[in-house]
Image (cartoon, rainbow, N blue to C red):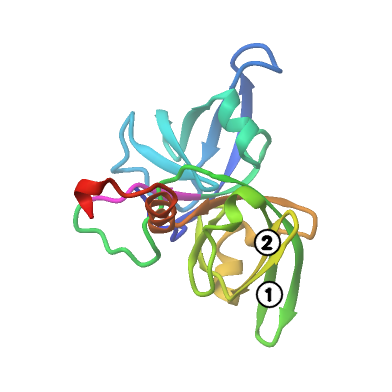
Amino acid sequence: MFTGLVAAVGRIVRVQPLADAEQGGVRLTIDAGGLDLNDVGIGDSIAVQGACMTAIALDGGQFQVDVSRESLNLTVGLDREGEVNLEKSLRVGDQIGGHLVSGHVDGMGTVLSFDTVGESRELIIRVPKPLARFLAYKGSITINGISLTVNRVTDTDDGCDIRINIIPHTQAVTTLRNVRPGDRVNLEVDTIARYVERMLSIPRPDDLK
């Protein structure tokens, strides 16, 4: 589990195909940037751009992860060199400053605009229809591994548009500083919303009434 509070911005410095380019996954070598790897061991989880990955090798300030073809097909930003948001997994006693994040990307959204509004910026993202039902005003959403609050939800025929306020600090210390209209982003809906939707979608057995 994670909190969605990005600990550092690292960089994918090498993408190595593991098998056939179209069918296989890749091995990523990631420069951890400011992320302290002293307490990270082989097999530990690190969220990379919002996707939970397992460290398979450590070398100084770098680590490696293997990304399956399935993960590559369902995420963005893990198939090429570039900056990525990083967060180590939660440990007992850690402060939860964002919200509980599993690191399982549910889908991809598209950035419609990212404009300056006062001292902050307003990020508008088109969310695909299968995820739209999980989003609500003042609810939580994880975008590229960042825990954020939804300020407005507008339903559309093919999903919904969400508006999010991004303060200067968040933009400066995450990969949101690189986002442009038309970019795709990784989305993870709130875990509680997922369970509520499931509970409401099936009839209650008579013995539980």
Q: Residue 182 carries which label?
A: none
Name the side, left or right, on which 60 lies relative to 15.
left
Q: Which amino acid does label 1 sit on?
A: Glu
* Placement of 56 over or under 61, stated as above or below: above
* Placement of 111 over or under 108, stated as above or below: below
Q: Residue furthest bottom?
A: 118
Residue under the point 59% across and 21% down:
25
Q: Where is residue 181 in the image (x, y as percent from the top left)?
A: 79, 60
Q: Earlier in the sequence, mark 1 or mark 2?
A: 1
Q: What stretch is highlighted in magenta?
A: 86-91
Q: Which of 32 and 189 is in front in this view?
A: 189
Q: Which of 18 and 39 is in front in this view?
A: 18
Q: Where is residue 205 in the image (x, y as percent from the top left)?
A: 28, 45
For label 2, count other residues whose C-alpha is less than 10 Å away and answer few (under 14), some (14-19) or many (20+): many
Which residue is under mark 1? Answer: 122
Magenta stretch holds residue 106: no
Give SS at disc 2. Answer: strand
Name the side, left or right, on which 120 lies relative to 65.
right
Quarter of the figure with residue 7? bottom left
Name the side, left or right, on which 165 lies relative to 193.
right
Q: What residue type is labelled 2?
A: Cys
Residue under the point 20% across and 52% down:
92
Quarter of the figure with residue 180? bottom right
Q: Which mark is residue 160?
A: 2
